[in-house]
Image (cartoon, rainbow, N blue to C red):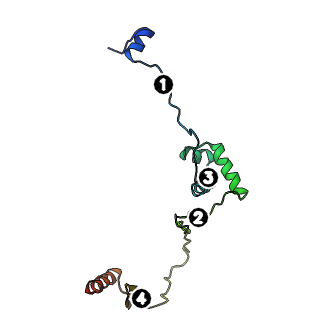
Amino acid sequence: MGLDVGSDEERVVAGFAGRVEVIEGPSGRRSWPDVVKAQIVRESFEPGVTVSEVARRHRMSPQHLTLWRRAAREGRLTLTADRDDNGGGGGFVPLAIDASRSEAAPFVDEVISVEVSGIVLKLPAATTANRIAEIMLALEARR
């Protein structure tokens, strides 16, 4: 009981189109904002990453990414940290932790000062965050 449609004429009538090949990849021209270009180029410069896999992940040709990498090396594409719409920095700075230090750093100030809506609250540094929140909510409710 398989699909047996017979001759070419019968296949066309039965709606059988034959083999269909789907080609995936970049198509047409796209406009890439400089921030996105910089992000993709930075990603391609990560250790152990190949240009081909980054290009494939972003659905672009490796040759296109190579042109951007060259532009970055020549200073024509800036690889600064991501910026938000207001022009401010939106990226993170890597954090380095010295594992050899076992002692906790001492508090510089033994008082926590919080100011919200003109209310200044000064509490001992050992006060928990939950307690500070409770006090601030109570003060806000009195206003």
Q: Are marks 1 and 2 in contact (CB under 8 Å)?
A: no
What is the secondary structure assignment of the residue under circle 3?
helix
CA gap, disc 2 and disc 3: 15 Å
CA gap, disc 4 and disc 2: 32 Å
Q: Which mark is residue 44?
A: 3
Q: Callout 3, which amino acid?
A: Ser
Nearer to us: label 2 or label 3: 2
The quadrant of the picture occupied by the C terminus is: bottom left
CA gap, disc 1 and disc 2: 44 Å
Dot 1 alpha-carbon crowd within 10 angstroms: few under 14, some 14 to 19, many 20 or more: few
CA gap, disc 3 and disc 1: 34 Å
Q: Which mark is residue 81?
A: 2
The location of residue 68, given as percent across then percent down, is 66, 51
CA gap, disc 4 and disc 1: 69 Å
Residue located beneath label 4 in the image: 113
Q: What residue appears at the point 60 percent right and 54 percent down from the top-left corner? A: 37
Answer left or right for 84 relative to 7.
Answer: right
Q: Quadrant of residue 15?
A: top left
Q: Callout 4, which amino acid?
A: Ser
Q: Nearer the viewer, residue 27 or 46?
A: 27
Marks 1 and 2, the one that precedes in the sequence: 1
Marks 4 and 1, the one that precedes in the sequence: 1
Please, is residue 127 above or below residue 22 in the view? below
